[in-house]
Amino acid sequence: MLAAITEARSLGGHRLFLRFDDGTEGIVDLASVVRFEGVFAALRDPAYVAQVTVNRELGTVVWPNGADLCPDVLHARICGAAIPAGSGGAAVA
């Protein structure tokens, strides 16, 4: 893992503000990161997106249904870097 997420808050719609423990911060639009299917289908609803929390053990964002996202993918999106191999999983759009 490159960096752990230390803060997450909904900005409305599918956008999240994220801060990482390495000082990186920025906005991620979940619509560009996940396919809204399976466990991620609930994220179609912006009100559900707003229920985001940070799981300190995993260093990433989670939702009440157990959905979480790879912090490496989110970090790469914010930095404009290539997504690390093997980090995307089935959810990456």
Image (cartoon, rainbow, N blue to C red):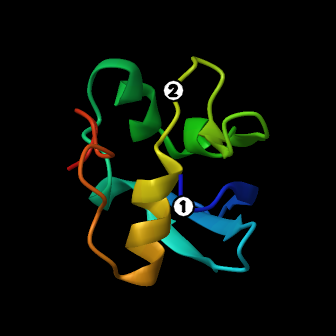
Q: Residue at x 26, y 43 (%)?
A: 86
Q: Which residue is mark 1?
A: 2
- Can residue 14 be seen from the camera position used here? no
Q: In this orientation, which residue lies closer to the viewer: 43 or 76? A: 76
The image shows residue 68 at horizontal and vertical percentages of 52, 33
Residue 5 vertical position relative to residue 55 in the rendered view, above or below: below
Dot 2, crowdedness within 10 Å: few (<14), some or many (≥20)?
Answer: some
Residue 38 vertical position relative to residue 42 in the rendered view, above or below: above
- N-terminal-most mark, 1 or 2: 1
The disc label shown at residue 61, or none: none
Q: In this orientation, which residue lies closer to the viewer: 41 or 25? A: 25
Residue 19: quadrant of the picture? bottom right
- Amino acid bearing label 1: Leu
Residue 26 vertical position relative to residue 57 in the rendered view, above or below: below
- Amino acid bearing label 2: Ala
- Can residue 34 be seen from the camera position used here? yes
Q: Residue at x 57, y 43 (%)?
A: 49
Q: Residue at x 57, y 19 (%)?
A: 66
Q: Report if the CB atoms under discs 1 and 2 are less than 8 Å apart.
A: no
Q: Residue at x 29, y 63 (%)?
A: 83
The image shows residue 2 at horizontal and vertical percentages of 54, 61
The image shows residue 63 at horizontal and vertical percentages of 62, 30
